[in-house]
Image (tube, grey):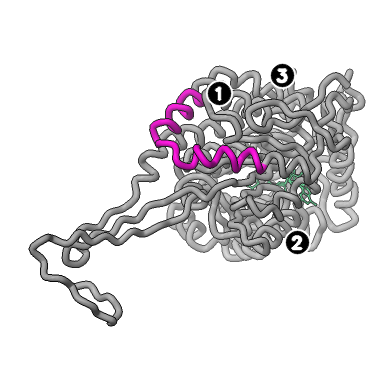
Amino acid sequence: MTKTVHHWIGGRTVEGTSGNWGPVTDPATGAVTTRVALASAAEVDAAVAAAREAYTSWGTSSLAQRTAVLFRYRALLDARRDDLAALITAEHGKVHSDALGEVARGLEIVELACGITTELKGELSTQVSNRVDVAAIRQPLGVVAGITPFNFPAMVPMWMFPLAIACGNTFVLKPSEKDPSAANLLAELAAEAGLPAGVLNVLHGDRVAVDALLEHPDVAAVSFVGSTPIARHIHATASANGKRVQALGGAKNHMLVLPDADLDAAADAAVSAAYGSAGERCMAISAVVAVGAIGDDLVQRIRERAEKITIGPGTDPASEMGPLITRAHRDKVASYVTGAAAQGSEVVLDGTGHTVEGYEDGHWIGLSLLDHVPTDADAYRDEIFGPVLCVLRAETYEEGLAIVNASPFGNGTAVFTRDGGAARRFQMEVQAGMVGVNVPIPVPVGYHSFGGWKDSLFGDHHIYGRDGVHFYTRGKVVTTRWPDPADAPAGVDLGFPRNH
Ligand code: NAD
């Protein structure tokens, strides 16, 4: 072990004092490389106090001040893309090019935050009644907490804090304890950009820290991204404690392939979206529903492509897919493949025996492909979060749509077809928050919002985009009357005020 990751509170590194540490592993070697501080409730208090103190001035800072910092931050992040990506690869395992993609998508939200002046313009109605004007403004909430998952250690925090601080809030980020280092670099660069101390704090920890944040009276709102059971817990607990909360959960994303689709394009998309980042994406395609007679042909094309993917450490430019986050997760993913045949699936590709020479202790699993998967099989029902693609068969569009809509999850989905009418029908009828038409991973651009339906999101707001601005601000409506000196005195009137 060579490295220790501490908290970042009040604009500086603060050593962990709880005496609890979590191990951080290089997934390619299986070696523990780092220990991360796990905060106690007292350390949560310190981070929230720093954020609260900073809010007294940041909450009333000018938009010009905030955007000046954000523009400098954007430039620093741009210059340090490679360093951020290297930290992600070292602790998450994803290949460097994929890590760079994550940083780029996070930057989109910083860019959106640079334009916060437009988003916070407010509304004004003049002369709604005689000499009466009405202004609608949005103001920050105070201290906001963000709790983020392991699979996007830079991008998901960047879905949250740039917009939150641009809106005038201060922020306590609790990143995943499995890959904590990227968050510290994000905070250090923000300080270098001129963000005042305490506006962005990084508090490392596990459920102890999370539960203390959820109950803390000085935390006004919570943004969460992670698995469905934890999202449900976060939403219930934060709501019970009177906080505004958005909790994005897990997924099982379906790709419906209609008989008229370009099968080569569909197979390319299925392989890219199912196996990219070793399937550890909330927008990964994990189920393909083949409609009509194309099933065998499509499975064959997916198989041919999947067999050519190079698996190896994320630091090797030749690698297209890296290892899984932990040994325990790797073994759990493998169990879905080894148990698949007994539950009625046809195992087309079994990656469970895959090893990488020179990296024998890494958390490897090869690409796995299951066909004719029954809807009651564990591999179909559970979010596996690994490189395992299930193919299901349907006779008709209606049957395929019914499969997609019966899923308890509703994050992303895609339809592959050349028929515009069918695509439009799917877009209108499918129960999911994000839909791709011949686009397998329809992650919305920064100026639209990201979010699922059903068990993929608890709360009313999607994340980033206009929904993000709305989530991190609250509305105030000001009604003003400036009487003209020539007006007769209004006099006392006990009637309910009417506009005329
Ligand atoms: P996770 O739910 O295990 O952890 C997420 C966060 O919650 C971490 O910071 C973790 O420390 C904390 N946490 C874990 N257990 C907790 C508990 N019992 N009490 C309080 N806090 C707890 O998720 P993960 O394994 O890190 O990430 C993968 C999951 O995240 C997948 O389910 C994936 O689909 C989901 N995800 C969803 C989205 C989305 O936008 N919907 C995006 C990325 C990831």
Q: Secondary structure at mark 2?
A: loop
In the rendered image, residue 14, in percent from the top left (x then y), is placed at 74, 29
In the rendered image, residue 170, in percent from the top left (x then y), is placed at 56, 41
The residue lying at 27 percent from left, 75 percent from top is: 497
The residue lying at 83 percent from left, 47 percent from top is: 347
Which residues fall within the magenta stretch?
Answer: 48-74
Q: Secondary structure at mark 1?
A: helix
Is residue 402 magenta-colored? no
- Measure how far apart labels 1 and 2 are at the Cα level: 44 Å
In this rendered view, identify the residue nearer to me: 300 or 309.
309
Toward which corner of the image does residue 121 lie, by quadrant?
A: top left
Specify which label sits upstream in the sequence, 3 or 2: 3
Q: Dot 2: few (<14), some (14–19), or many (≥20) neighbours within 10 Å? A: some
Whether residue 99 appears in this view of the structure is yes
Chief SS of the magenta region? helix
Residue topped by disc 1: 77
In the rendered image, residue 194, in percent from the top left (x then y), is placed at 52, 24
| In the rendered image, the vertical position of residue 413 relative to residue 83, given as above or below | below
**Mark 2: which amino acid?**
Thr
Q: Is residue 216 left or right of residue 3?
A: left
Q: Dot 1: few (<14), some (14–19), or many (≥20) neighbours within 10 Å? A: many
**Mark 1: which amino acid?**
Leu
Is residue 58 magenta-colored? yes
Residue topped by disc 2: 375
Give the label on residue 318, or none.
3
In this rendered view, identify the residue nearer to me: 143 or 321.
143
Q: Is residue 11 left or right of residue 280?
A: left
Whether residue 257 appears in this view of the structure is no
**Mark 3: which amino acid?**
Ala
Find out whether the residues at labels 3 and 1 contact each other: C-beta distance under 8 Å. no
